[in-house]
Image (spheres, rainbow, N blue to C red):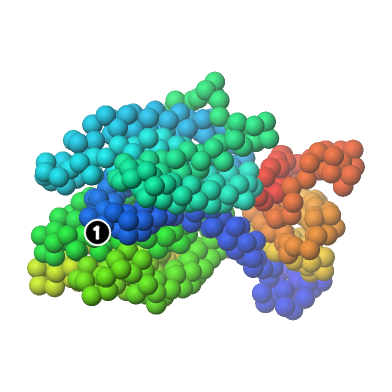
């Protein structure tokens, strides 16, 4: 029986014959856009405090204060590097365990993550508080006039543990659907830092120590707001020293290390750029770049946020071996990310003059001129960095550590160092600023060359651009992707399932069971989950692999508690309701993953 005869047999429309069922990716877009703000906040936190400290310091202490804040930025990079090793590894592993329905391991990873962050951050805090002069000499490359920098380091060192633990808590809040609590913590942190800076610097005249202490107090508040949730009984994911599984530590470190290479390289780049600017443009060049870097986390909150959101989503879909889902995620991340990055970049360029004046009120000074141009040139790297972040975070989720490390080294250090050494001797600080744009272009060319080598030709579609292995997941011929947006879509697309099964030699009875499962679950989700004012959809994927027929049904409706499930499905759960299909039913699992209700049925 040919395809046209099969379509007539199952009464499928001409449109379905040409197009087949479709999955429009709207659910993935909504989840991506829900994750993005939290991830942007995570990146922007340090930059927000650096921006506040820099603005107040330069206006109430003097231009030299901006130099102190700038010299400390590489230390912040080191702290972020340590933090990201554990955080990125934890996020990727949690995503994969969620994708494989191994929910019990999430708590163990969370506990292990917090334990090591606590140990490392407390040790780092104590060392920098007791020995600030040693760190100051290393940062300034001189033992003279280190008092102000040492005082700032001592003040800010108190808040390091609260900063690092707060970041960990905040990253897991989105899995608990507590985004509002995350934003409240950031708003309170900024408020405390602003008033703390004014109180310690302007009122108590504590100068540099007060500047650092105010930041530490803001980190304490930032830690407490999300921390209270995890110390309550309401939290689903809880930390427990009893659940520590030290065997998972090596997995976390190996998985998270490539992402941290980027931060480590940026820390090295910070030291290098400070040196080259001091040599070719003096303290004005360092102060100008420090002003931009004070806003750098705000500038690149979109870029890094898009990258991390990509990591979380792709790790879940890699765990599910959902080939088409990954393609949709990457298209969403690249398109939405580039739009957001371009808008933010344009805003910073347009407002370069007032931003420079925020740090330096004398508009006739050389440092103001350099700062203004730094705010015009540096944002041009954002769209380039967004594409880089999306691709590298995907490679990391896919465990391609070698290419991640190579690209991170080129982007973080290699490219900038080469172009800066070529341009800075002739063009001074302006050459240093332009070198970062050229480095961004160069690393994207390296990614393109990598895809050409892997594909043995120029990639022709997204799957080839992502260089997916042939044995990963299943191809289009062995899967059905359906999106249900309204009740009428159920009849429109579920009739395709028996056709799909018969074409692959699956028995008619087993095909009928698959259609019944999809139709029954979809009807109940639409009836009881689509009754609010929000836009919802149901994504259904049917996969045929190794003689197993796997049905994965996802919806973005509100999660149901046990009482609501009984009202909808009767006294029995969905799993028990399907017992009548026991002959073909191998397993049924349901859970909530990143705010999505996921049911996986294997026939």
Quadrant showing the C terminus:
top right
Q: Is residue 30 above or below residue 599?
A: below
Callout 1 crowding tier (Cα within 10 Å): few <14, some 14–19, many ≥20: some
Point out residue 534 in the picture as x, y percentages from the top left corner.
Answer: 75, 62
Q: Nearer the viewer, residue 3 or 164?
A: 164
Disc count in the image?
A: 1
Quadrant of residue 304 in the image? bottom left
On screen, residue 253 versus residue 558, left or right, reads left
Point out residue 532 in the picture as x, y percentages from the top left corner.
Answer: 80, 60
**Residue marked by disc 1:** 63
Point out residue 554 in the picture as x, y percentages from the top left corner.
Answer: 69, 53
Q: Secondary structure at mark 1?
A: helix
On screen, residue 18 versus residue 39, left or right, reads right
Q: Nearer the viewer, residue 328 or 205?
A: 205
Q: Inspect this view and state whether residue 505 appears.
A: no
Taking the spot 79% from the left edge, 66% from the top edge, the residue there is 486
Q: Nearer the viewer, residue 347 or 13?
A: 347
Taking the spot 32% from the left edge, 59% from the top edge, the residue there is 59
Q: Inspect this view and state whether residue 553 appears.
A: yes
Q: What residue occupies the far top of the structure in this picture?
A: 242
Quadrant of residue 344 in the image? bottom left
On screen, residue 515 versus residue 21, left or right, reads right
Q: Is residue 398 above or below residue 5?
A: above
On screen, residue 44 versus residue 225, left or right, reads left
Taking the spot 64% from the left edge, 54% from the top edge, the residue there is 543
Q: Nearer the viewer, residue 11 or 55?
A: 55
Point out residue 255 in the picture as x, y percentages from the top left corner.
Answer: 40, 42
Q: Is residue 268 above or below residue 333?
A: above
């Amino acid at each position: 029986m040919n395809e046209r005869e099969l379509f007539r047999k199952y009464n499928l429309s001409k449109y379905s014959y040409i197009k087949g069922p479709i999955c429009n990716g709207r659910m993935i877009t909504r989840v991506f856009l829900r994750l993005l703000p939290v991830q942007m906040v995570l990146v922007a936190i340090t930059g927000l405090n650096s921006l506040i400290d820099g603005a107040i310091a330069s206006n109430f202490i003097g231009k030299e204060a901006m130099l102190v804040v700038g010299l400390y930025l590489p230390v912040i990079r080191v702290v972020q590097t340590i933090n990201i090793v554990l955080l990125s590894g934890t996020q990727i592993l949690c995503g994969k365990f969620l994708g494989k329905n191994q929910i019990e391991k999430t708590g163990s990873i969370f506990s292990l993550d917090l334990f090591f962050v606590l140990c490392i951050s407390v040790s780092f805090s104590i060392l920098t508080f007791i020995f600030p002069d040693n760190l100051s000499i290393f940062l300034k490359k001189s033992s003279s006039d280190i008092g102000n920098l040492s005082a700032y380091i001592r003040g800010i060192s108190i808040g390091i543990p609260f900063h690092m633990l707060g970041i960990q808590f905040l990253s897991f809040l989105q899995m608990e659907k507590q985004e509002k609590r995350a934003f409240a913590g950031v708003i309170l942190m900024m408020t405390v830092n602003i008033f703390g800076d004014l109180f310690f610097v302007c009122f108590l005249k504590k100068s540099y120590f007060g500047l650092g202490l105010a930041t530490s107090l803001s980190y304490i508040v930032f830690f407490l707001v999300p921390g209270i949730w995890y110390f309550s009984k309401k939290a689903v994911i809880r930390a427990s020293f009893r659940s520590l599984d030290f065997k998972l530590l090596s997995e976390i470190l190996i998985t998270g290390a490539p992402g941290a290479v980027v931060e480590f390289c940026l820390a090295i780049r910070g030291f290098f750029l400070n040196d080259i600017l001091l040599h070719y443009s003096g303290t004005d060049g360092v102060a100008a770049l420090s002003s931009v870097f004070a806003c750098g986390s705000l500038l690149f909150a979109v870029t890094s946020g898009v990258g991390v959101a990509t990591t979380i989503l792709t790790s879940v879909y890699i765990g599910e071996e959902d080939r088409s889902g990954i393609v949709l995620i990457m298209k969403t991340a690249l398109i939405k990310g580039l739009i957001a990055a371009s808008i933010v970049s344009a805003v910073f360029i347009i407002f370069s003059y007032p931003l420079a004046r925020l740090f330096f009120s004398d508009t006739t000074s050389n440092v103001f001129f350099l700062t203004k141009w730094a705010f015009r040139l540096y944002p041009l790297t954002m769209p380039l960095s967004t594409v880089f972040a999306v691709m590298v975070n995907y490679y990391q989720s896919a465990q391609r550590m070698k290419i991640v490390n190579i690209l991170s080294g080129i982007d973080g250090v290699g490219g900038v160092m080469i172009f800066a050494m070529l341009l800075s001797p002739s063009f001074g600080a302006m050459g240093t600023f332009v070198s970062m744009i050229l480095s961004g272009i160069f690393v994207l060319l390296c990614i393109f060359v990598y895809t050409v080598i892997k594909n043995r030709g120029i990639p022709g579609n997204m799957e080839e651009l992502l260089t997916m292995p042939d044995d990963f997941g299943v191809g289009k011929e062995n899967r059905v992707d359906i999106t249900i947006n309204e009740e009428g879509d159920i009849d429109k697309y579920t009739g395709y399932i028996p056709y799909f099964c018969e074409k692959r030699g699956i028995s008619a009875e087993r095909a009928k069971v698959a259609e019944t499962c999809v139709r029954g679950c979809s009807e109940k989700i639409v009836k009881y989950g689509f009754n609010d004012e929000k836009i919802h959809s149901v994504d259904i994927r049917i996969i045929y692999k190794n003689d197993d027929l796997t049905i994965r049904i996802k919806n973005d409706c509100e999660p149901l508690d046990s009482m609501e499930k009984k009202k909808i499905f009767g006294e029995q759960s969905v799993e028990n309701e399907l017992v009548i299909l026991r002959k073909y039913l191998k397993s049924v699992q349901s859970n909530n993953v990143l705010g999505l209700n996921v049911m996986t049925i294997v026939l």
